[in-house]
Image (tube, grey):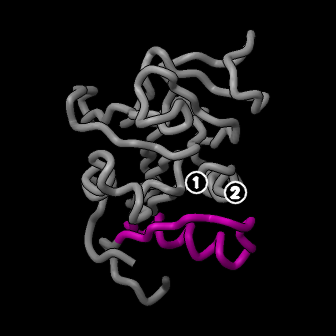
């Protein structure tokens, strides 16, 4: 990463907790103008977000939507918004995604529907006390001269998923410079 000239974009799908050297390299990349896109649904990216000091976390439960979905409630269709909060920027289809817990200074660019819910206990049904939609699933945070883009589904760009919605376009709108 130290040899990559910014602006550039790095897409990361974490499957293991990152080590100290990786965290430091990613921090330098973002601080110096890089765009870091993190696709994660299990929460392995939470260590990275904590290290970077960005107020986003992946919950880890399953986002369910029995009405706005593709074939099954675990494959919700979610709306994409622009920087001004305007809907109709397309829709993406998620696959066993989670939802985000966001703090101040975080811009949400994708929301689940009003009918969605967060299956915190992994029961497959809506339980009392579980969060209800709309829930944030895509967010962006500025950091240094770069930015961190988060989407709560690691499967979004799989070959079997890209044609189900505006999945590629939703990620591509955040890409700057070369993609690594």
SS for callout 1 = loop
- The residue that mark 1 highlights is 40
Residue 152 seen anywhere in this rendered image of the structure? yes
Q: Is residue 79 above or below residue 130?
A: below
- The residue that mark 2 highlights is 44
The residue nearer to you, when weighing 4 against 44, is: 44
Which residues make up the magenta segment? 9-34
User: Quick one: label 2, few (<14), some, or many (20+) residues within 10 Å?
Assistant: some
SS for callout 2 = loop
**Which quadrant of the rendered structure holds the C terminus?**
bottom left
- How many marks the image carries: the answer is 2
Give percent across and percent down for residue 158.
44, 63
In the image, taking residue 48 as reference, residue 33 lies left or right, namely left
Give percent across and percent down for residue 54.
58, 47
Tag 1–tag 2 contact (CB < 8 Å): yes
Q: Which mark is residue 62?
A: none
Residue located at (57% from left, 35% from top): 99
Give percent across and percent down for residue 160.
41, 60
User: Quick one: label 1, few (<14), some, or many (20+) residues within 10 Å?
Assistant: many
């Amino acid at each position: 990463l130290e040899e990559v000239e910014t602006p550039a974009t790095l897409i990361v799908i974490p499957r293991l907790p990152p080590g100290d050297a990786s965290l430091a390299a990613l921090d330098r990349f973002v601080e110096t103008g890089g765009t870091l896109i993190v696709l994660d649904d299990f929460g392995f990216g939470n260590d990275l977000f904590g290290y970077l000091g960005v107020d986003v976390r992946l919950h880890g439960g399953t986002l369910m939507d029995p009405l706005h979905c593709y074939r099954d409630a675990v494959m919700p269709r979610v709306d994409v918004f622009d920087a001004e909060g305007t809907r109709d920027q397309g829709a993406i289809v998620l696959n066993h995604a989670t939802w985000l817990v966001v703090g101040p200074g975080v811009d949400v660019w994708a929301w689940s529907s009003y009918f969605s819910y967060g299956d915190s206990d992994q029961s497959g049904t809506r339980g009392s006390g579980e969060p209800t939609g709309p829930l944030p699933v895509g967010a962006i945070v500025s950091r240094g001269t770069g930015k961190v883009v988060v989407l709560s589904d690691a499967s979004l760009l799989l070959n079997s998923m890209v044609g189900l919605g505006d999945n590629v376009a939703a990620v591509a709108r955040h890409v700057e410079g070369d993609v690594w």
